[in-house]
Image (cartoon, rainbow, N blue to C red):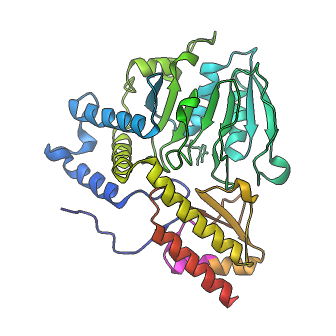
Amino acid sequence: MSTLHQTKLVHNFNSGPSVLPKEVFEQASNAILDFNNTGLSILEIGHRTSLFEAVLNEAISTLKELMKLDDEHEVLFLHGGASTQFFQVPMNLLDDNETAAYLDCGTWGTKAIKEAKLFGNVDMVASSKDRNYTYIPKGYAIPSTSKYFHYTTNNTIEGTQMHAIPETNVPLIADMSSDILSTTLDFNRFSLIYAGAQKNIGAAGVNIVVVKKDILGKVSRKLPSMMDYRSHIENGSMLNTPPVFAVYVCMLTLRWLKQLGGITEIEKLNDIKSKLLYDTLDSLPIFRPKVDKEDRSKMNVVFVIDNPELEKLFLAECKENGMVGIKGHRTVGGFRASLYNALPLESVQALTELMKDFAHKH
Ligand SMILES: Cc1ncc(COP(=O)(O)O)c(C=O)c1O
């Protein structure tokens, strides 16, 4: 029986936390009242029970399956959001006298660089700051002596995305918070991947870390257990109480993606959604996409109207038509439509129809 009572039609373009599949909301709601016919709420079961172990195991195995990870890679569900990974990564991997290479492609990458400098040297191999992060730098060299190379695969705020994995012989580390599981990649090429769950994986409150075991245990500093990836691996993401409900929502979302046919299938839908929106933007001169064409993000579409009055008007029309989360980040302005995995094609169709109508009127 469905306990979901959503009467209002809403198109959710939020950048995160963001849209999740309707069936996940239904199942999660039901589990708050009665988890798997146990008579208990998911919120009141112990994390060391077989009930929760089954949830965590399914979340881990489904993620491994979706990402086609080999046995060298471990999957962790940790606290602290992707922002904790900005410092946990260098804390575990970079000694004081060592240098890591970083790409500076946007707000989140800049934050990762700032934190890494607390633990060692940072070689910023390239930056797109000169044009307000509206493109992805190309043709830079990653010194082979770097301890690792860190980059953000998708720049959530600025709306750019790396469409290929950089060629390098040093360990690759990526913040995939806003495009993980949206596009097929050889995830095994990475030594460490992290992502906050609250976009394509599930609910806020948990982040995933995929780590290749061979890069760990090489720094000389002492690590607090909660910061040491090895202690989390040894304890199967149960070093302390995990965010039980957030992990459960992730498991349901991962199960949904698997049933849909996995990353290759969702990628087809993501391509259709982003193409429809970019084609519409390109055909209507009133709207101006902000980033270089070749670097456009399929997850976060950033655009402006070069007239503040019309911008306000368009925003008001979006609101009237049940479109939420379309306002751009305060540092960038304009608009941002986030097209994460769970956003239905119908929402993009509704937005593009509204855009055409608006362009016609103005
Ligand atoms: C690419 C990227 N990295 C990191 C973060 C920070 O994530 P959190 O709020 O989970 O720390 C975000 C948040 O939107 C993001 O988009």
Residue range highlighted in magenta: 315-326
In the displayed structure, 347 sits above or below 211; it is below
Q: Residue furthest bottom?
A: 361
Q: Is residue 49 magenta?
A: no
Which residue does the image show at 73% across and 33% down from the upper left?
A: 102
Which residue does the image show at 52% across and 74% down from the upper left?
A: 349
Q: Say whether residue 301 is visible.
A: yes
User: What x and y, as percent, mark residue 215?
Assistant: 58, 18
In the displayed structure, 268 sits above or below 223; it is below
Which residue does the image show at 50% across and 22% down from the upper left?
A: 229
Which residue does the image show at 33% across and 43% down from the upper left?
A: 248
Where is ligand 1, by quadrant?
A: top right
Q: Report the label total.
A: 0
Task: Judge by depth and name the residue closer to the eye, 195 or 48.
Answer: 195
* Residue 120 falls in image quadrant: top right
* Residue 24 falls in image quadrant: bottom left
Left or right of residue 149: residue 4:
left
In the displayed structure, 89 sits above or below 336; it is above
Left or right of residue 48: residue 332:
right
Q: Say whether residue 317 is visible.
A: no
Q: Is residue 317 magenta?
A: yes
User: What x and y, as percent, mark residue 55?
Assistant: 29, 37
Question: Where does the N terminus fall, quadrant-wise?
Answer: bottom left
User: What x and y, as percent, mark residue 86?
Assistant: 63, 33
User: What x and y, as percent, mark residue 292?
Assistant: 76, 58
Left or right of residue 38: residue 265:
right
